[in-house]
Structure formats: structure tokens, C-alpha cells
Image (spheres, rainbow, N blue to C red):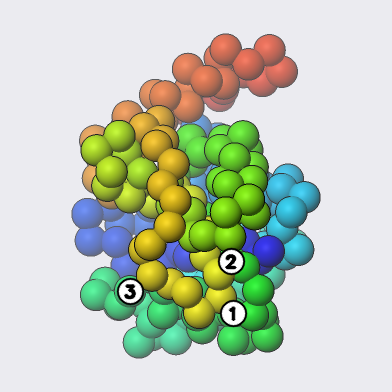
Amino acid sequence: MLAIIPARRGSRRLPGKNTRTFIDKPLILWTIKQAKRVEEFTGVVVTTDDPAVQAICREHNTRCISRPMELAREDTPTWWAVEHACYTQNWYGPVCLLQPTSPNRTLKQIHNAIDIFNATNQNVTTVFSEGEPNGSIYLRHWKRWDWLGKEIVDAETPDIDTQYDWDLAENYMRQKLAAAPHRTPKTN
């Protein structure tokens, strides 16, 4: 299973969000580090058009694919970029899309999604309790990008699109880190 992290440069509502410092490191680095801890992933690939994201990937020894401009527009479906990443990596197996804008996603949630995917052989998507996809985890079979499949209710990981979302996610993460005995969050 290949983990793909899409990190487009052009966010209108929150410019530079993927490289902006979230607690104590760039937002995208939370997802990169988390993905590298999942044993089921045979690799972790970032697809981006952002030189700053590419620099972070080089610094943290993470494969990075330069995304063509036509696949980095605001109206381009993310799955086109995922498909491009798969082709460039000669990958035709299962794919786990992890959005960098969901830093509060947990390893337990990823493993739960993988277990359901393996047990049912169906696509898996994390959703809010209302059934709306929340951008946290998408598990797909190669060439089956449809939305049919299993949904996992996951209300704790809102996708960061606005400053309000950012503040909410950062406060939640600070609380999580403060409760963890092994780590204390840095202050800004």
C-alpha cells in the first residue's frame, strides 16, 4: 500500500498552509512523520508544485513528485494528482491518500481504516458524523477512485481550510500533546 500526500501550493483561503508552522513544525511534516510510522505502507510519496514543500521533503528524506501545473489548479480533482503520482512511481496497488490538512488524524484511525479495507476489499473514507468526507483518510484500490465503499465516522479531524479551522485544529493538538506524558507542546 502506497501513502500519497497531496500538497498543492495555491490555497486561496489560507496561503502557504502546508509549510506554515503548526505547533512546532510545518503542517505537512505532521502527516509525513505519521505516514512513515505505518508499517503497512510500502512507501510515502508527496505530490506537490510547491518548492517549499519539496525542500521539506528533501530535508526529511521523503520521496517527492513534482506535480505539473495543470494538476495543481484549484479546480483540479485531487485524484488526478494521485493518479499521476502512481504512474510516476509505477504503482498499481492500493493507495492511501492522507491530506496534510488533517494533522489531528491518529495512527489508530489509519490502522482502523486499513483493517476495514483489507477485511472488506472496499474503498474506505473517513467522514464527519453527518456523512460528509473530512479529508483525513482515503483508501482506494488502484483505478477504483469511486466513492462507493465503507465510511468511518471520524469527527475529530476537521480539514484545515480557513484560519478558524487552523486555530481549532491547533488548539485540539495542543490539548492532545499536553495530555501525552512524553511530549510538551512548544508555545509560539
Q: Considering the image in quadrants, where does the N terminus appear?
A: bottom right
Instruction: Give the number of the mark in front: 1 or 2.
Output: 2
> Circle 1 — which element?
helix
Q: Mark 2 points at which residue?
A: 95
Q: Residue at x 37, y 57 (%)?
A: 16
Contact between labelled residues 2 and 1, with CB atoms less than 8 Å apart = yes
Q: In which quarter of the image is residue 54?
A: bottom right
Contact between labelled residues 3 and 2, with CB atoms less than 8 Å apart = no
Q: Residue at x 63, y 16 (%)?
A: 180
Q: Could you classify mark 1 by the number of other residues whose Cα lies within 10 Å: few (under 14), some (14-19), or many (20 or more)? A: many
Q: Name the residue under label 1.
A: 86
Instruction: Give the number of the mark in front: 2 or 3.
Output: 2
What kind of residue is marked 1? Answer: Cys
Residue 99: tell me if it is visible.
no
Q: Earlier in the sequence, mark 1 or mark 2?
A: 1
Q: Mark 3 points at which residue?
A: 77
Q: Could you classify mark 3 by the number of other residues whose Cα lies within 10 Å: few (under 14), some (14-19), or many (20 or more)? A: few
Residue 73 drawn at (x, y percent): 30, 77
What kind of residue is marked 3? Answer: Pro
What kind of residue is marked 2? Answer: Val
Residue 40 drawn at (x, y percent): 74, 54
Vertical order, 143 against 110 (above or below) = below
